[in-house]
Amino acid sequence: MELPDGRLVPITGGASSAETITTANVSYWSGPATSTHDTVTASPGQSGASAKQALSSPRPAFASTGSGNSSTGWTPTVVITIPATAAMGTYTGTVTHSLA
């Protein structure tokens, strides 16, 4: 998952490789805008499941044009593919959305 400084870290349940799910196994798509406010025109980075992308590097959720106090809402989807060799347990991770 992306840290605020742009580094990516895996989802982990512990320290071993069997307890780590890499970001290549985590896919994301933003889907369409569910709301917009003010004069913004929002274009999704990934409009649907067929456009999903692995989070092995930062991905844009939306591109927008507009000015002033505008906003865009969306309901993203995250899919985690658990490797067959993964240890059973509870895993945690964080998805960070940032503005550029």
Image: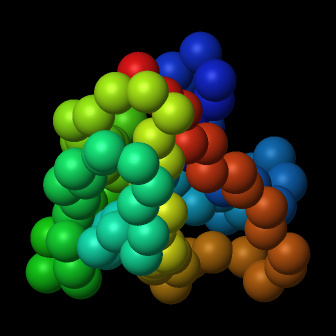
Q: Is residue 63 visible?
A: yes
Q: Residue at x 25, y 40 (%)?
A: 64
Give the side of residue 58 with respect to residue 98, left or right: left
Q: In the picture shown, does residue 3 fall above or below 91?
A: above
Q: How is the image coloured?
A: rainbow
Which residue is found at the position 43% from the left and 27% from the top?
A: 68
The image quadrant of residue 31 is bottom left
- Residue nearest the observer in this picture, 7 or 98: 98
Is residue 27 visible to the viewer in this orientation of the structure?
no
83 or 76: which is nearer to us? Answer: 76
Viewer-side residue, 62 vs 83: 62
Q: Please tell me whether residue 96 is drawn above or below residue 14 in the rendered image.
A: above
Image quarter of residue 25: bottom left
Which quadrant is the C terminus positioned in? top left
Number of marks drawn: 0
Judged left or right of residue 38, residue 22 is right
Q: Quadrant of residue 37?
A: bottom left
Q: Measured from the top left, where is residue 58 in percent x and y? A: 37, 36
**Which residue appears farthest toward the top when viewing the image?**
5
Q: State the residue in front, 29 or 73.
A: 73
* Quarter of the figure with the N terminus: top right
| Residue 92 appears left or right of 28 | right
On screen, 95 above or below 52? above
Q: Residue at x 23, y 82 (%)?
A: 49
- Give percent across and percent down for residue 36: 41, 60
